[in-house]
Structure formats: C-alpha cells, structure tokens
Image (cartoon, rainbow, N blue to C red):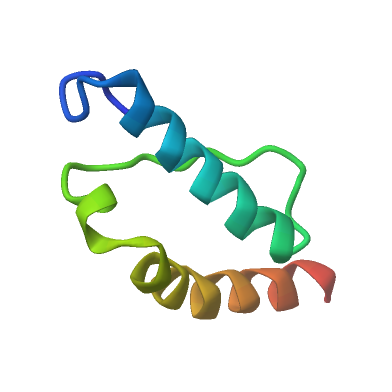
C-alpha cells in the first residue's frame, strides 16, 4: 500500500508497485501479500530495495515450504 500523502504523484506510486511486484515475482511469492510503503522508499532506489528485500524474502520462502 502506497499512501497518497507520502507520494502524491500517481507515477511514483505506480513505479513503487511495479518494483514490489517484480521483487515478489522473482521470489516466487505471487499469492497476495500486503506491503506498506513509507516515505523514502522511492529515494532508496531499486537496487538498494532489492538488497534489503532479498534476504528477508528468502528466509520467508524457506520457512513457508518446510
């Protein structure tokens, strides 16, 4: 969920949603999860976000399949 108060432009909100969808797609998590985005997410850049998300998602996927 990307709040309009944090990112007033639809272009930015849609970009964030695309990034999150892509990260979850590569982690084989397409079932529907809620991600709350705070101010500063977009400014981190895609590569840094992937670096932050990947270890957490790998741990989540491994625990889910056991």
Q: Residue drawn at (45%, 42%), measured in percent from left and top? A: 35
In the figure, 25 relative to 5: above or below? Answer: below
In the figure, 15 relative to 5: above or below? Answer: below
* Residue 48 position within the rendered picture, expressed as x and y whole percent measured from the top left: 35, 72
In the figure, 15 relative to 44: above or below? Answer: above
Residue sitting nearer the eye, 12 or 37: 12
**Looking at the rendering, in which quadrant would you find the N terminus?**
top left
* Residue 46 position within the rendered picture, expressed as x and y whole percent measured from the top left: 40, 62
The answer to which quarter of the image holds residue 44 is: bottom left
Whether residue 33 appears in this view of the structure is: yes
The answer to which quarter of the image holds residue 52 is: bottom left
Count up the numbered dots: 0
Residue sitting nearer the eye, 38 or 12: 12
Q: Residue drawn at (63%, 77%), measured in percent from left and top? A: 58
Whether residue 1 appears in this view of the structure is: no
* Residue 32 position within the rendered picture, expressed as x and y whole percent measured from the top left: 68, 37
**Looking at the rendering, in which quadrant would you find the C terminus?**
bottom right
In the figure, 5 relative to 61: above or below? Answer: above
Residue sitting nearer the eye, 60 or 66: 60
* Residue 10 position within the rendered picture, expressed as x and y whole percent measured from the top left: 34, 20
Residue at the outermost front position: 11
Left or right: 37 as drawn, with respect to 18: left
Left or right: 40 as drawn, with respect to 23: left
Q: Residue drawn at (72%, 55%), measured in percent from left and top? A: 25
Q: Residue drawn at (62%, 53%), measured in percent from left and top? A: 22
């Amino acid at each position: 969920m990307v709040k309009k108060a944090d990112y007033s432009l639809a272009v930015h909100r849609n970009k964030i949603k695309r990034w999150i969808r892509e990260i979850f797609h590569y982690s084989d998590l397409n079932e529907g999860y809620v991600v709350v985005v705070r101010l500063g997410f977009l400014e981190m850049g895609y590569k840094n976000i992937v670096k932050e998300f990947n270890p957490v998602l790998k741990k989540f996927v491994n625990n889910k399949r056991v």
